[in-house]
Image (spheres, grey):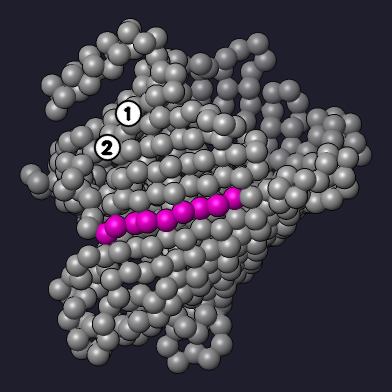
Amino acid sequence: MALALGAAFLFLGAGSARSQGRLTGSFDSNTIIYTADPVTHTEVSPDNRYGSMNYLKLDYGAKDWGAGLKMEYHPSVIKGFDASLKGGSLTGIYARWGKTLGGVKVEVTAGDFYEQFGSGIALRSYEDRELGIDNSIGGARIALSALEGAVRVKVLGGFPRYGIGSMLNSRTTTLLGGADLSVRLNDILGIDKENATLLPLFTLEGSFLNRHEGTVPSDIEALSRAGGFSVPSDVLSTSARLLVEKGPVSLSGEWVHKGRDLTSTHTLGSLLDWGLGDGDALLLGASASIGNVSATLTGRQLRNMEDRMFRTAGALTEGNTLNYLPSLCQMQTYLLAGLNPYTTLARGERGVQGDLYWRLPRRSALGGKYGMNIHIGGSYIWALPVALSNHDSPAMAYRDLNFDIEKKWSPELRTVLFISIQENSPSHGQTSRTDAQNVFVLDGTYKFRGSPFSIHAELQYLYSQELTRDWMAGVLEVNFAPHWGLALSDMYNHGSTKVHYYSAMCSYSQGALRAELSFGRNREGMVCSGGVCRFRPAYTGGQLTIKYSF
């Protein structure tokens, strides 16, 4: 591994000197030492004393050319991540060429790349290290842009990555082939700039993606024989998108259809019913900004839209995914507000989410001397009958109402009052049971005038009659800009378990380097990033995180 890293640096460094190109890169390391904790009943064996996951990325560009590589070394996978990530190797490499030919910008990529069609419902190839997702596509992509970006075309083909290992044996046998088109209709129709100010701007987009799975796993073959159906080798997804913009107002819509694929019709206890079915999704959005007020409204419906690199009747891992289906509700950042997050029901759900933002300017009657920001948002999500057993109508799966008010009292002091009212169905509407919780947060930051010293504190309370009942939490952060930071936090479940989940952290930053050392007890539960979640088991231990970019 070390020899490979050294060779990569020497090769790219020599290339930089010859062609006056630029070498950039990043290094990311996350290591946890686990300790036994009788309070949370977590044990440490010789095989799971620690977890360490390390990433190195290098990119080199000169004139019309670019190239890069990625290496990973995970001697022991951190708890909660897919065990298939264990190991180390060169996990990605690419070369890119781009040039403008006859007024058309052309870009060709060979090797590993990431891509997204629309909102990602049809395809999203991306990396998220918090979730253990890296489904880069190994193959080729051609992107064209003409008429100053009025027409854009992308065509791609390749094999998505799953797990770790060499670039070849970490690829699935699933072959992806697809294309995406985006057209600004106003430019194509030749509407001049004077009339363009009177008319909305229309953007029409569409895409298709074919997933070809050359071999059918044995467990899927057994299911198909038992069910009397044959699993297709190809599944075609198509989408159409429209964006309308006029000044501060925009409207958007996306429709996706997924071809017939293996699907579980519903879950009843431990019994899964399997069969074939198509899927579809509809996403509608609207946003407007008038003066100091802005608002967004989003509606979405999903039916059988789970799309995996390869089919399996066993447990699904986060890494085995081809599309992006974040939960349609506020992404909570406070400790207690995100304690029991909602996860998307890809088999069938319908939801709506709305947010209203009001900025009260400085020296106004309500804003006061330094102004104030108010946000009100909420969501309501139903599970559809297609995903439920013995249901003829949709059932409530999740709903929330969030309110926060940010007030600046002086050049030094800023506070936030946050309230979140949540109700979650643990069975996604299968039963009538729901879990409700109300979260209250007081958040304050004080920056000492003429000093790099600042203090940030949070007081949080969660009231609930269900699950583990009431919680309280506190956070204290002390920052000595621009280098040092200290933080202490504790979540205490005084309603049921009487367990403290504490954490102490020290961080150091210098230029592009950030190092963080922490120790604490972590609760079992879901960890979310961008609205997508993974399960994390409980653990206690020390953690060292290093990030460096150049």
Can residue 412 be seen at all in this image of the molecule?
Answer: yes
Can you name the residue that lies furthest to the left here?
Answer: 46
Q: Position of residue 36 (x, y in %)?
A: 19, 46
- The type of residue carrying mark 1 is Gly
Q: Crowdedness of circle 2 by 10 Å Cα count: few (<14), some, many (20+)?
A: many
On the question of residue 471 being in view, the answer is no
- From the viewer's perspective, tell me whether residue 27 is left or right of residue 302: left
**CB under 8 Å between discs 1 and 2:** yes
State the residue position of label 2: 92
Residue with the most extreme top position: 17
Mark 1, secondary structure of its residue:
strand
Q: Residue furthest right?
A: 365
Q: Is residue 181 left or right of residue 18?
A: right
Residue at horizontal 40 percent and vertical 21 percent from the top = 61
Q: How many marks?
A: 2
Q: Is residue 90 magenta?
A: no
Q: CA distance from mark 1 to mark 2?
A: 8 Å
| Residue 177 painted magenta | yes
Q: Amino acid at mark 2?
A: Gly
User: Which residue was labeled with disc 1?
Assistant: 68
Span highlighted in magenta in the image: 174-182
Q: Nearer the viewer, residue 104 or 371?
A: 104
Residue at 28%, 34% (x, y): give it.
93
Magenta: predominant secondary structure element?
A: strand
* Image position, residue 52 (x, y; %): 22, 37
